[in-house]
Image (tube, grey):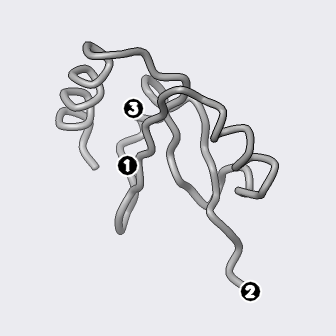
């Protein structure tokens, strides 16, 4: 994902309301589990970015992402 479209999208969304977290799904992130699901369910608004193929531009991680979550381990 390139930074320009993601920046435009997140900026437009944040102009409408506040977000508690901007989450990026990544193998490097904290493993998603039931306690995390419970905590996230209590938040008012979240944005979830899901990279495809090669992932995202590193500047998106630096400027927008507040948390990285891994959706599971491949065993």
Q: Which mark is residue 75?
A: 2
SS at mark 2 in the image = loop
SS at mark 3 in the image = helix
Mark 1 residue crowding within 10 angstroms, few (<14) / some (14–19) / many (20+): some
Residue plotted at (26% across, 36% down): 6
Mark 3 residue crowding within 10 angstroms, few (<14) / some (14–19) / many (20+): few
- Report, in whole angstroms, how far the alpha carbon at label 2 lies from the one at label 3: 31 Å
- Closer to us: 51 or 9: 9
- Report, in whole angstroms, how far the alpha carbon at label 1 lies from the one at label 2: 24 Å
Chain-order first, disc 1 or disc 2: 1
Hey, which quadrant is residue 27 in on the image? bottom right
SS at mark 1 in the image = loop
- Closer to us: 18 or 7: 18
Above or below: residue 12 compared with residue 25: above
Which residue occupies the extreme right position in the image? 35
Hey, which quadrant is residue 18 in on the image? top left
Residue 34 placed where, x, y %?
Answer: 78, 56
Residue plotted at (81% across, 49% down): 35
- Report, in whole angstroms, how far the alpha carbon at label 3 lies from the one at label 1: 8 Å
- Closer to us: 25 or 28: 25
Chain-order first, disc 2 or disc 3: 3
Nearer the observer, disc 1 or disc 2?
2
Q: Which mark is residue 56?
A: 1
Residue plotted at (71% across, 73% down): 73
Q: Which mark is residue 59?
A: 3
- Closer to us: 22 or 51: 22
Residue 49 placed where, x, y %?
Answer: 41, 47
44 with respect to 6 (left or right): right
Residue plotted at (26% across, 20% down): 11
């Amino acid at each position: 994902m390139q930074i320009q479209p993601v920046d435009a999208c997140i900026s437009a969304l944040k102009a409408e309301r506040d977000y508690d977290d901007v989450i990026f799904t990544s193998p490097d992130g904290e493993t998603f589990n039931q306690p995390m699901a419970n905590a996230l369910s209590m938040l008012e608004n979240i944005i979830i970015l899901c990279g495809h193929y090669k992932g995202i531009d590193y500047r998106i991680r630096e400027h927008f992402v507040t948390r990285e979550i891994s959706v599971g381990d491949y065993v």
